[in-house]
Image (tube, rainbow, N blue to C red):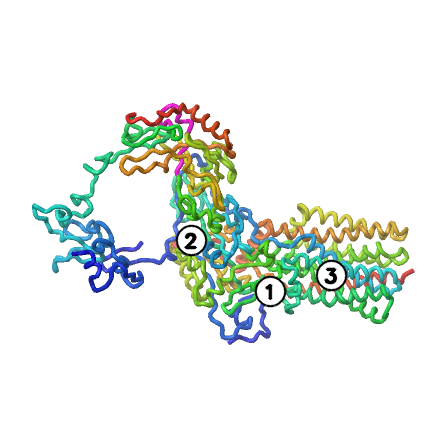
Amino acid sequence: MRLLDLLRRDGVNQAARKKPHTEQSWVAPEWAWSWPANRRILYNRCSADPRGEPWSERKALIWWDADHGRWDGHDVPDRPPSHRPPKDATGPDALAGNDPFIMQADGKGWLYAPAGLVDGPLPTHYEPQDSPVPNPIYHRQQRSPVRQVFGRDHNLYHPSGDEPGSEVYPYVVTTYRLTEHFTAGGMSRWSPYLSELQPEFFCEVSPELAAERGLAHAGWATIVSARSVIEVRVLVTERMTPLTVGGRTVHQIGLPYHWGPNGHSRGDAANELASIALDPNVHIQEVKALTVDIRPGRRPRGPELLDLLHDYQRRAGITRQTGTEVRG
Amino acid sequence: MSDVTRRGIRGERPGRQASGGTGTRTRRRGGGGEQAMVPAPEFTSYYGKPVLNPPTWQARDIAGYFFLGGLAGAGSVLAAAELTGRERTARALKASSAVAVTGSVAALIHDLGRPERFVNMLRVFKPTSPMNLGSWLLAAYGPMAGAAAALEAAGRLPRTGRAATTTAASLGPLVSTYTAVLAADTAVPAWHDGYRELPFVFAGSAATAASGMALLAAPTAENSLARSAALFGVTLEAAATRAMRRRLGMVAEAYEVGTAGRLMRAAEALSFAGAAGAALFGRRGRAASAVCGACLLAASACTRFGIFHAGMESARDPKYTVVPQRERRKERRRRAGGDEQPRDRRKEGK
Amino acid sequence: MTDSLIGRNLLAGAEPDPAGDAGHADHPERVGFFTDTSVCIGCKACEVACKEWNAIPEDGLDLTGMSYDNSQGLGGSTWRHVAFVEQTRPVGAPDPSAPPDSDSETELRWLMASDVCKHCTHAACLDVCPTGALVRTEFGTVIVQEDICNGCGYCVPACPYGVIGQRPDDGRMFKCTLCYDRLGAGQEPACAKACPTDSIQFGPLDELRERAALRVDQLHDDGVPGARLYGQDPEDGVGGDGAFFLLLDEPEVYGLPPDPVVTTRDLPAMWRYAAAAAAGLLGGVAAAAAAAGRSR
């Protein structure tokens, strides 16, 4: 069937239809068109067992009506449970009636991924590029051996885990969003109404970390990585808790990443601290987990900032090779 | 929690009926093992922020207006002293009242956010607003005081002048005390909670100021009235202030600390010095009585500014609002026989 | 049909029809807000919607350190203000919903509440306004007529909740209008429309009060004993608020007064004392004159 035929079924332009949710079921099949078959929930076949009975009557999405030999339910189903493809079928036609993962070649959900992943076939655990703790699963493999790294002077990595120098950057940073700003803040920081709701770049630390590093609530702090030095206001809050990892305390620092040098509300950019280390499959940089040091007070400007940066690098013994190993 | 059944969604609640939740648990290092029950604090606030919005009034304008208004009103009463033969006292006080009420109104207009709209004060006649009634009062009193002074200075129309003086003298006391109602008719604890005594404080302070002006500006031969009036004013003010601070309870602290405390203590000292000095040395000569007069004027000003600052402080610190109100609510519940704690229906077995 | 005003105390106590008493004949039902802080998520959509609709200026880019509250409080340029309170206490503390557990655990709670003008039945700001700029609308709400206000500032310390404030570069006083212009067009106020969780509910006041009573009971059944209504009682010190709240802790935790009373309640007594003091002043000076005798 051509797409246009599908769309004009019932004599209605399905894609243009915008029936409000108050006039139809919560699945909303008559709100626009969900290509290709108006299936609203992908893999909805999973909601029922191989025979077509819902796994739970409290979560019944589609079910097989044996009396009438058809599916019934709230969403668009695929094949009858008893359907078995002919031997010479190829592509999606080769899927059986109890293969729920219709986007996969064999219709199954994969825990073992024999194709399609550079770092398959089984999931495992590697520590992030910068990490304060050694990999608890593999003593001799800290990071993913197939990650993409770029050993440059402006992109130096940290010693991690048990490597000497990792204690120079002992704390973990995680970056996140605030409700009041949007992504990098390029739009929201120019809105006075949003800027006044969260006017300054701040970090969130636990009272324990504040005591350890002498940070004052509503004061300033400087955060240092091997890539850059930034300054933030400090929010000391019990919502941040010290973690216990590998038998010792690891403190975390929360950083919203909405700030930059322009707009009504200005501040340093959190992502200045991050390195470029890419995941092997889709080449996304790892900016959500890194290690840093934090100290009270505002950061230096100009050449003094570089002095501080290099001082830290020296103390940690960082070279262009640090953290770039494939094995180890 | 809602279910998706074969017949559709069941048990769905709109967002506003969501379960409130009881918070999250966090595991923290250390922490006291023997932590006893944390007692409910007697006083909490929202980060120490004021509950009220402190007045936008400037001290110089509004406390100045209190002082000048009191001086003018009581001065008009004393100006009726011409009936006792004190011609020069009367002349001085008529002039000072006219100047003072003008200054008072100027201070009021200066304090407005939109001074060009001052006429809107007379747009309505509104009994629930002391500032509105006060505007009408000043609109009646001001011309009377002005006429009395002008006719005195020009030496013309004595009967008209006498009528103006008498009218000013009859309106004067209210001019001196209505400002206490104006201050008390707010939510400011240091002012509102003292609403019974504050008019007497203002009356006494006004009498003090007017007597001070008389001592300063009139010849010694006439100043026995001023000395007696000073004693009256100082005594009334002191007694009323004491009574007010006793009634205020913990709010009285606003009159004792900081700028307010310094000003109230200065007012007390200056009043005493002025009145006692006048009583003892007032007949000795112009210089002595002038100094005493100046002390009394300064005392009255200190009182008004002290009261103003005490009010600002009591609005700024949330404890003055929260603590008395908690007490009042607790007392009311106790009398009604109800329980203080909110109910947990699950414990009651519904 | 309004009742006669004669013989009634209009300064305090229950007043079922403030709009009618203010002179509106054939007026619509009284409307207001029920702000249920138990479902507030602290998104501040109400603050933004209010500022956008009413073209209110930005009023301060200061990080306060007061959790996520950088708006600080209600004023001339903040008509909706979301309060954030982080509370922790040891689990051993009295909380019937908490099972006993290890001593090193604490319970963390983050209270969020959107504050607004209460549109009191007995509004002190309205009572003390000398120019008549503050008026009661036909909906029972209280607004400032900005072409009349001369910025005298009397309403500011009169309000027991600390709502109304001055705009410094303008000089006049401003506060929430309950979106009077939207009400006239049959729409709900901007903040209520924007609120994603229906924490801010708008409607006829009677209906809101019923709904609130049911909600408090529901929360008590769910094991939230600290839930309570604030400002819904027509017998309270301001005659009940047009905008009332469901709180999860004491009012002062949120910066609200525990027991607000309209100052005008005591006004008749104040005038009596002032009259007595004035008489006392006159009498005192007369006595002084008698004591002093005639001039020498």
Quadrant containing the C terminus of chain A is top left
Q: Amino acid at mark 2?
A: Cys
Establish whether labels 3 and 1 are both on one chain.
no
Between the residue at mark 3 and the residue at mark 2, the CA separation in whole angstroms equals 50 Å
- Residue at the spot x=49%, y=68% of the render? C139
- Callout 2 environment at 10 Å: few (<14), some (14 to 19), or many (20+)? many
Viewer-proximal residue among C216 and C36: C36
Mark 3, residues whose alpha carbon is within 10 Å: few (<14), some, or many (≥20)?
Answer: many
State whether discs 2 and 1 lie on one chain: yes
Q: How many residues crowd around disc 1 within 10 Å: few (fewer than 14), some, or many (20 or more)?
A: some
Whether A188 is drawn above or below B184: the answer is: above
Look at mark 1 in the image and give the residue it sits on. Answer: C148
Q: Which residue is nearer to you in this view: C287 or A222?
A: A222
Query: Is disc 3 in contact with disc 1, using a CB cutoff of under 8 Å?
Result: no
Chain containing mark 3: B
Give yes or no for residue C220 being in the magenta stretch: no
If you read the primary sequence from the N terminus, does the residue marked by circle 2 or circle 1 appear first? 2
User: Chain ID for label 1?
Assistant: C
Q: CA distance from mark 2 to mark 1?
A: 36 Å
Comparing B318 with A39, the one in front is A39
Specify start and end residues of the magenta stretch as a single range: A158-174
- Does any portion of residue B344 appear in the rendered image? yes
| Residue extending farthest right | C296
Circle 2 sits on which residue? C40
> What is the x, y in percent for residue B122?
66, 67
Chain of the residue that carries numbered disc 2 in the rendered image:
C
Dot label at residue B176: 3
